[in-house]
Amino acid sequence: MPIAPGTKLGQYEVQDFIGQGAMGLVFRAYHVQLQRTGAVKVLQGISPDPDSTARFRHEAQAIAQMRHPNIVNVYDFGEHEGVPYMIIEYVPGGSLANRLSNGQLDTATALKYLRGIAAGLDHAHGLGIVHRDVKPANVLLEKDDTPVLADFGLAKLLQGSSLKSMTGVTTGTPAYMAPEQVTGIRVGPAADRYALATIAYEMLTGVIPFDGEGLIELLYAHVHREPVPPSARNKSLGPRVDAVIMRGLAKDPNARWESCAAMVDALSAALTRKPEPAVARTVVMTPGASGPSAVAPTAAPIYVDAETPSDPMIVAYPSPPPPVLKRKSRKGLIAVAMTVLILLLVIGVAGYLTTRPMPALSLSPSTVIAGDSVLVTASHLPANQSGEIRVHSTLRTFVFRADSNGNVSRSIDVPRDEGIGDHTIQICWASSCGLTAILHVLEPVAIVTPTPATSPLPSPTPGASTSPTQHPATITLSSAIVKVGGSVTVFGSYFNPGTTGTIYFVQASSTQRATVSIAFTGSFSKTVTIPLTAVPRVAASIKACDTFGGCASQPVTVTAT
């Protein structure tokens, strides 16, 4: 008999039904002897096999040992007729998701919630526990408005081969998932910090970073696209707030904040416009009056910013005085002095040009699907310089203006009818196009949305095709002419999303392979090396296949040099 009102779970009696989430049902329960109310989470996403049950017990024990004001207490756990359950602290104040649905938070309230969430996460991370599903719905609010984290580690419990095919069950919520969760890379505390930065973005702007995206586009954006800066959505936020949030949303886990508290502290300083701790100031005080005269009103102190050191200078040290020569011409002395001055000027200019940062251009990402956007970033341009971003093939231009530091950042949409292949992007100013980068454009992928399953799907029959794509797989090459020992980049599209592919170099006397991870969009890019055993002027091809049998190939010409 399944868990329902009236069921006895140890000393707790299940009472009324509270709600249902992706992980199962939630009931209110009551411990008669302790006169304590709890909440029972029935974890229907875990199959009742021995491995899953053992893993559930191990993780539940670790979660139950945590004690922190911002983490929900776990009172008990077990299995009822093979179905795992947890009895946790009952928090009657609703969730942060409900609070956010009522409107955007003021700065003080947002920082209060973020500090509480950060404190709970840092405590768990110190114990080696990662939440994996930080989101407003998993932040409960006490009667005094204290935020309390729930469902710690339950996402990990739902991982593995025993995961049921339930609609909505995943090892994270897509809107708050870190890139490494999307790609399946090892997940650590940095994933929780990414989710916390996403919540901070939502609190301050009223929307999530990638708002209005479909599921596949949302997962792709977490890995490949940069979000719109918060200040672009809320004009009251400044660049310091942008810097804090965007660091928290960095694609590289190592580039994010070292702790949740560090991010919230930096965000608080940016929102309240507190000066950076490293800024030193000198207080200039008016000298006190001497003698018994009346004391004048004290003038306000004058703050003078500490003088910044000047740029390095080249100083010519005089040589020892030459021996006195008779009949030395004044014209000769003037010529020597001019020569020395010219030499010092040349050295100074050369030193300036050597140490001056060179302008740079980058694209993020450098490979896109037609219909997506690319962030064009340039640095070390002349301050406040105006110019154009040019996209070649079919020429399109976009006007820009560099900031006071010579930096440019602009997002450009790639039309769905843009030609497939390589496109040149240039940064042009002062009648010259000094920076160039290559943008790789792939065909848009047609995604077929699967019908929600009502029961676990059977394992695929060996040999049967389970490909979800309707368009045949295709590949394009960065070059159709390759050198022995050289390399070529393979761009694939319309492969089965989320699978592993194999790229082959095929020739009569030589075969070499490399593996590649296929993205949720069904596309990939991989640079492969042509083997040294390849024979010039002999027919060869590059072939790519996924695990479901989707394959495509392109011929290549092999040369010796």
Image (spheres, helix red, strand yellow):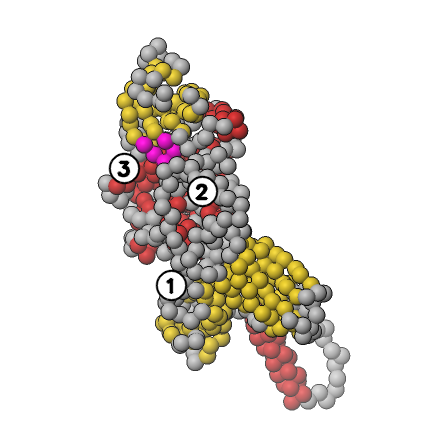
Looking at the rendering, which quadrant does residue 487 occupy? bottom right
Work out whether residue 115 can be spotted: no
Residue under numbered circle 2? 193
| Type of amino acid at the residue the image marks with label 1 | Gly
Q: Nearer the viewer, residue 545 or 358?
A: 545
> Is 26 left, or right, of 185 in this rendering?
left
Q: Which mark is residue 371?
A: 1
For discs 1 and 3, the disc positioned in front in the rendered view: 1
Is 264 drawn above or below residue 67 in the view shown?
below
Residue 100 x/y as whole percent:
28, 41
Helix, strand or loop at mark 2: helix
In the image, what residue occupies the spot 44% across and 23% down?
A: 82
Instruction: Please tell me whether residue 23 belongs to the stretch shown in magenta.
Output: yes
Residue under numbered circle 3? 98
- Number of other residues with Cα within 10 Å of mark 3, as a class: few under 14, some 14 to 19, many 20 or more: some
Instruction: Please tell me whether residue 252 belongs to the stretch shown in magenta.
Output: no
| Type of amino acid at the residue the image marks with label 3 | Asn
Q: Say which quadrant the C terminus sits in.
A: bottom right
In the image, what residue occupies the spot 51% across and 64% down?
A: 475
Q: Nearer the viewer, residue 75 or 24?
A: 24
| Type of amino acid at the residue the image marks with label 2 | Arg
As measured in the structure, the alpha-carbon distance from the residue carrying label 2 to the one carrying label 3 is: 22 Å
Q: How many marks?
A: 3
As measured in the structure, the alpha-carbon distance from the residue carrying label 2 to the one carrying label 1 is: 30 Å
> Is 541 left, or right, of 119 in this rendering?
right
In the image, the segment drawn in magenta is 20-24
